[in-house]
Amino acid sequence: MKKHVLSLIVLLMPLSVLAAPPQQPKAEGIESPNYVWNADKGEKKEILKLKGNAERGKEAYQGCQGCHKPTGAGIPDGTYPQLAGQHASVLIKQMADTREGRRDNPKMFPFAGKHVVTPQEIADIAVYLQNMKIPRDNGKGPGNALALGKDLYSKDCLTCHGDNGEGNAGKFYPVLAGQHFKYLAREIRDIRDGRRRNANPKMVKVVKDYTGAEAEAVADYMSRLLMPERAAEK
Amino acid sequence: MKQFTIAAIILGGMAADSAVAAPPKGDAEKGKQIVSQICTACHGLDGNGTDPTNPEFPKIAGKQPEYLLKQLKDFKAGKRKSDIMSGIVSGLSPDDMTNLAVYFAAQKSKPSVQKNPELVESGKKFYAEGSPDSGVPACSGCHLPDASGTDKYPHLAGQHAAYVFQQLKRFASGERDNDRGLVMQSLAMRMSEQEMKAVSEYIMGMK
């Protein structure tokens, strides 16, 4: 009798296993000797081949705006970064890195994984966001070390991220202008300390000796950069 | 001839696929006849639910037809579990379900009376902002600020608090898992019971 009950339980077990939200996978990142930054492969490569459509992107973005807000501005405390006006290429790379598990973000993953957003939708969302105006009321720093921030920026950041924090779409260097101070400071620290596993090793080298105060000073300076508006793509 | 038949089948298949994206078309009058027989006791003839305190009697008036049809199909396929609804839908044909979805979608959702107004303020904040600390997106992102929803995310305004609360609990426990990409499940798991109660109360008062 007991045996029957047991086998019945075993039989029923698969039925009682509840569907759980998918967990973020883990891909090799900067901690691995085989890591190649921005390797020309994977989902990023596939999505970059697709033609994004801003109108469709607006609809697909609904699933993102609960956190990143309808304006794309995120929130000034930096929990959710500002996305409006970001290069489509950068957005696509970061989404692909998150989906493949090279950029750790277990909070975001359930809302951004392959089970929720298609590659075409990512291409669409990227154009939609790139066309948006960069807000000017982003979170800024305390403003007490802007001279140091400017020095550091000119010496360490300007070559790649540009005079006005405009980044470089072709090289996948992000726009910094209009980004929240707290998000910038957190990412610099995470890149310095190896927590941001999809980081560019060149940048890790640049910031590796930054103190916390230096990271905040340069983040504060960056958060105040203004870049010219770009022409919208269809 | 054979070639034509194959072409017709392919074309027919394509039409069926494209019909998935378009709102379902059905006969609301035929739907109403079914409602008067098997739905009205719980959901009411106008779909506003006959007892706001009973979580098994949700308001379904004015919801998107896409959503209503999906839920009916999911009940029938066992993808959404309910002892009551599984019995009710067992006798319905695909056409019946489409007609019901079209009928209830065309009904007007009536305002509800809030029972716990003290929860409304925190519920309103949660609806608009979610919880950045625990990583819950704002409800307003998908369901829209006025909770009118879209073809992908259902209308919620005025839904009975008892039902919303029960569904959030079921998403959180995984008992309800017929949501697209398990998005609702993912976020409900991160909500406290107090947040669920507050947001349910706020939604009930939305028009």
Image (spheres, helix red, strand yellow):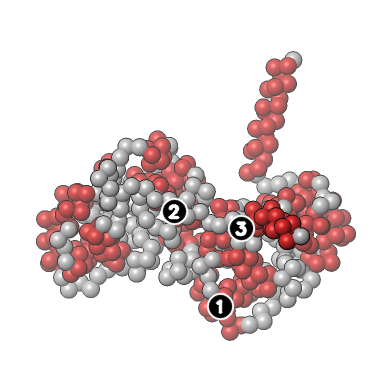
**Neighbourhood count class around disc 3 (C-alpha, 10 Å): few under 14, some 14–19, many 20 upward:** few
The residue to which callout 3 is attached is: A18
Question: From where the camera sits, is residue A75 visible?
Answer: yes
Parent chain of label 3? A
**Dot 2 amino acid type:** Gln
If you read the primary sequence from the N terminus, does the residue marked by circle 2 or circle 3 appear first? 3
Quadrant assignment, res A192: bottom left
The residue to which callout 1 is attached is: B194
Labels 3 & 1 near each other (Cβ < 8 A): no
Between label 3 and label 1, give the one nearer the viewer: 3
Does residue A192 lie above or below A97 as drawn? below
Residue A124 location (% of width, % of height): 45, 45
Horizontal placement of B121 versus A90: left or right?
right
* Along the viewing direction, whichever of A157 and A198 lies nearer the viewer: A198
Parent chain of label 2? A
In three-dimensional space, the C-alpha distance between marks 3 and 1, rounded to whole angstroms, equals 24 Å
Question: From where the camera sits, is residue B147 visible?
Answer: no
Q: Residue at x 51, y 72 (%)?
A: B126
Q: Secondary structure at mark 1?
A: helix
The residue to which callout 2 is attached is: A24
Dividing the image into 4 quarters, which one contains the N terminus of chain B?
Answer: top right
